Image (spheres, rainbow, N blue to C red):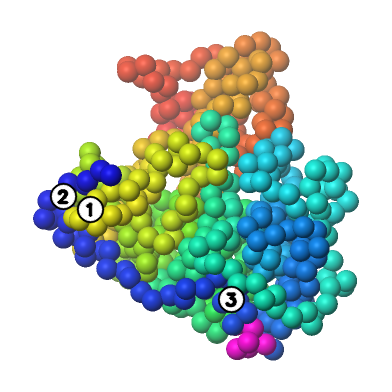
Amino acid sequence: MDKIAFSEEALSVHRKINRTDAAYPEESLKELFEAAVDRRPEAVAVVHQERTLTYRELNGLANSLSVRLAAAGVEPGHVVGLSVKRSPEMIVAMLAIIKRGATYLPVDRTWPDDRLNGILDRAGCTALLTDAPDELRARFGQLRVVPVDPPTLDADEKNPSLRVDPDSLAYIVFTSGSTGTPKGVPIRHRGVVRLVSDPSFVSLDENAVVPQLASVFFDAAAFEIWGALLNGGTSVLYPSDHIRLSELKRLVERNGVTALFITTALFNVIVDEAPGTLDSVRTILTGGEAHSLGHIERARKHYGDGKVVSVYGPTECSVFATHYPVRSSVQGESALPIGLPIQNTSLYIVADGALCAPGEVGEVCLAGPGLSPGYLGMDELTKKKYVEYDIDGEKVVLYHTGDRGFCREDGNVVFQGRLDDQVKVNGFRIELGEITHFMNEVPYVKQSYVTTSEKESGEKVVVAFVVPADADCTPQACHDHLVTKVPRYMVPGEIHVRDSLPLTGSGKVDRKALLAGLGNPE
């Protein structure tokens, strides 16, 4: 075990920011949800358009579906695929898997078959819950496909007697991987419970009304769903695949939304076009990409101090790790801080084997019960990213995020970019190297370079530049190849063919020159 060196100044600031220990239940999602049912059986748990489910109804349907999972051979500890469109049935399916002591794996049936098969195999998935059973049986005959069909379920089914260990796995999310292989990130029940139990960054109780806006393949959905249901509040499912501000405003006002999470890109659009959309919301959580100070300042002036809270956290830490309530003007700042650790989370800035003093830039490392146990089937990567250290006599497992940052004198952490080529686009984590990997597979591509460009609104767009090997190399041909290899959110929004890639004096691809050629210098 390595020891981390430190100066007294560095140790002092880290001790200050890491006083985050707080009591939280030593129970699983199953037990906490069932306790909420006992407290408020007739309260509304889920809203979707004109449909509502009470806690009693939701619980009974989930219990009945969990019985079917057992009949299909699903045992505690198994991984069950989840392919259900956003609906009350999706929540029923999630709960059914949890109540069986199994782990849910959200999958998108629009992903290419090769990618889906690889993900299902790596997770050891043998069963699939879905609202499209005929389609998925035809595509994935090796799986036991269990349909989600509420009219055939018994809403009076009693709770299963099974107890689920809080250290067992609740769900798995697959993120982009630089080698072309997605990385499976399993999250424990404990990590989610520590996130939504009496949180320091937002009020969650039986009066909480939280919209479910995020794709279920994006880890923010875990905060949205479990933050409401484990506290006896209401989860309001957004009715459409794509968010429209007029529709979001109606949903917020009609349901009395108290808190919501939106990606940085959507936040910027709301601030630019219709800030009144969120006037009645008590807390606006936003993150996923670096924030524009101009948008943050305009939002603060419109909503008032403290209503907007910037949140940060990689998937590996169970959704959120830090928070920064915007309580004063950010004019004159170099960047918006990612803030201080949330409850039961620790943060360390480390460089060259030592803790960094205020102002010194290093890698952001995280610790605490929110950490994933590691990547599925990737032992070497897990050993590299999750490392046990001795810090002033205390054994601490640190997750190396690959993000750079520094502590200010007041302890707030400021993000300073990445150590690698990972980016966040519309809240999705993307390894540019994974896109490059598949682009370079194309026979008619000699060279490729993938980066991001930023629109005036602050929204990031993935941009690819390719040098052709022959006349068959067109933007459309490259696009058509990529859609068979990666999810839609990873396909570049722009693909440009170039005779060659300009180089800097050090021999690296000159990103600035490429973007300047598009009329978009950075």
Q: Is residue 11 above or below residue 517?
A: below
The segment highlighted magenta reads: 36-41
Q: Helix, strand, or loop for circle 1?
A: strand
Give the position of the C terminus as an image quadrant: top left
Residue 135 horizontal/vertical position (percent): 86, 48
What residue is pinned by disc 3?
31
| Mark 3 or mark 2: whose residue is earlier in sequence | 2
Q: Nearer the viewer, residue 309 or 173?
A: 173
Q: Is residue 491 above or below residue 258?
A: above
Q: What's the amino acid at mark 3?
A: Glu
Q: Amino acid at mark 2?
A: Phe
For label 3, count other residues whose C-alpha is less than 10 Å away and answer few (under 14), some (14-19) or many (20+): many
Residue 218: x %, y % from top left:
58, 54
Q: CA distance from mark 3 to mark 2?
A: 42 Å
User: Could you tell me if residue 162 is visible in this image?
Assistant: yes
Residue where numbered disc 2 is placed = 6
Residue 37 shown in magenta: yes
Magenta region, main secondary structure: helix
Picture residue at 81% right of the left edge, 63% below the top: 71
Q: Residue at x 47, y 76 (%)?
A: 25
Q: In the figure, residue 333 lies in which quadrant? A: bottom left
